[in-house]
Image: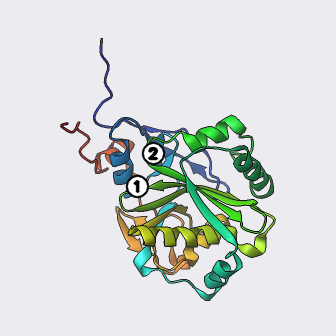
Amino acid sequence: MRHTLPLAPQFYVTAPQPCPYLDGRLERKLFTALQGESAETLNDSLSKQGFRRSQNVLYRPSCTDCAACMSARISVKDFAPSKSQKRTLKRNDHLERRATSPWATDEQFDLFRTYLESRHAEGGMADMDVFEFAAMIEETPIRSRVVEYTDRRDNALTAVCLTDVLDDGLSMVYSFYQPHLPRQSLGTYMILDHIEIAREAGLPYVYLGYWVPGSPKMGYKAKFAGLEVYRLGRWTRMQDPEAYDLDEHPISTDPIAEQVANISLPDLSPKAR
């Protein structure tokens, strides 16, 4: 008997678990599998609706008791670096960018472990081993790149970003860097460099993941000019970060069936050859 994947993606919900951004709250995610010939089309479409990719899964927050998370992206044409960001670019002009296919290396894993142990020792990824790391980097059904930044002076790997190429921009899936160089602001530098990559490629947006008002971990995203957040089913320009209510959310907290019904799906029917 021949089995085929359903044309319409099936959506599921995770069990509630402690929120990594806001103390005392629980998070829940709506997710679907990313697979088959239409994976890129689905990823492009759902990324515009607040979803993020993790390996072969697309997800977005769907919490029952909290509505804080907002997907964030930078409009390249509306971005202009601040004086501080210009200094960050200058401080890192000794770094050299190299974009490769998504392939994990021992050098990347060593830097990843150093980063986690310094910045996220109690986080959900703290126990990730080399095989899980390789899966995070390599298991992608869409067009992805590993962007490495090395120091020209000694060829040391300094920062890495796993980046997806969408039809309207770059999505920074996960980044990590040498944590013992705080003055270099490497996290900010990688975003600034991805804005330049997108500009060179003629892509209008750089997707940053979720911005959470009230979360110190996410505060840096609000410092970029041209930032947009996905709220109430549409992208809007970021206003004063202090004006956002922690209980506001871009995604309705309606029952799951209604949330799924309101997702706009692309045409996933097989194309004639």
Q: Who's the residue at 44% across and 56% down the image?
A: 165
Q: Which amino acid does label 2 sit on?
A: Leu
* Quadrant of the rendering where the C terminus is positioned: top left
Task: Report, in whole angstroms, how far the alpha carbon at label 2 lies from the one at label 1.
Answer: 8 Å
| Residue 226 position in % (x across, y down) | 46, 78
Mark 1 packing: few (<14 Cα in 10 Å), some, or many (20+)?
many
Q: Residue at x 69, y 62 (%)?
A: 150
Mark 2 / mark 1, whichever is N-terminal:
1
Q: Where is residue 145 in the image (x, y as percent from the top left)?
A: 52, 52
Residue type pointed to by label 1: Ser
Assess whether mark 1 and mark 2 are in contact (beta carbons under 8 angstroms): yes
The total of numbered circles placed on residues is 2
For residue 58, which numbered disc appears in the image? 2
Indicate left or right for 202 with 192 as reference. Answer: left
Q: Nearer the viewer, residue 40 or 52?
A: 40
Residue 137 drawn above or below residue 191:
above
Instruction: Give percent across and percent down for residue 129.
Output: 72, 38
Name the disc covering residue 47, or none: 1
SS for callout 2: strand
